[in-house]
Amino acid sequence: MRYELEKSPTEKIIIEDSEYKGHQLVSLRIYFLADEDEWRPTKKGVTFKREQLDEVLEALQKIKDAG
C-alpha cells in the first residue's frame, strides 16, 4: 500500500508498507521533485516495524487530541 500527502508543490510525504529481511515495515519519507518531473526520496524520513504501528497511531492520536 502507498499513500501520498502533498507537503508543498515540490515536496510530498510518501507513506508505504514494505518487507525487508522478513520484517514487515512502514515508512514515511519526504520526496522532492527533481528534474524532468521525477520524484526522488530524501534522507528525511522514518521506518519502523509494522508491529509498532498501533503505538505510533496512539501517539499521533494523543498529539491530535491535545491540539
Image (spheres, rainbow, N blue to C red):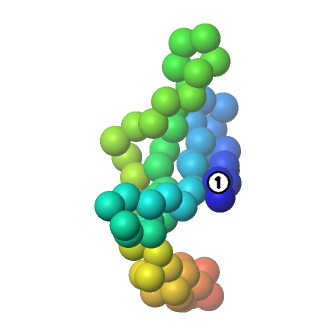
**Left or right side of 4 for 66:** left
63, 45: nearer the viewer = 45
Residue appearing at x 46%, y 86% in the figure: 55
**Above or below, 47 relative to 51:** above
| Residue 54 on image: x %, y % | 52, 86
Figure disc tally: 1
Instruction: Indicate left or right for 20 with 57 as reference.
Output: left
Q: Residue at x 49, y 44 (%)?
A: 30
For residue 67, which quarter of the picture? bottom right
Q: Residue at x 49, y 79 (%)?
A: 53
Q: Amino acid at mark 1?
A: Arg
Element marked by disc 1: strand
Q: Tell me if I can see residue 63 in this picture.
A: no
Seen as rendered, the residue at the extreme front is: 22
**Relative image position of residue 46 (x, y in whole percent):** 38, 59
Q: Is residue 52 above or below residue 46?
A: below
The answer to whether residue 44 of the structure is visible from this angle is yes
Instruction: Using a 10 Å C-alpha cutoff, classify the residue at mark 1 as few (fewer than 14 neighbours), some (14 to 19) or many (20 or more).
Output: few
Q: Could you say where residue 8 lies in the image, as x and y percent from the top left?
A: 63, 38
- Which quarter of the rendered picture does the N terminus lie within? bottom right
Q: Which residue is mark 1?
A: 2
Residue drawn at x 44%, y 66% is 25
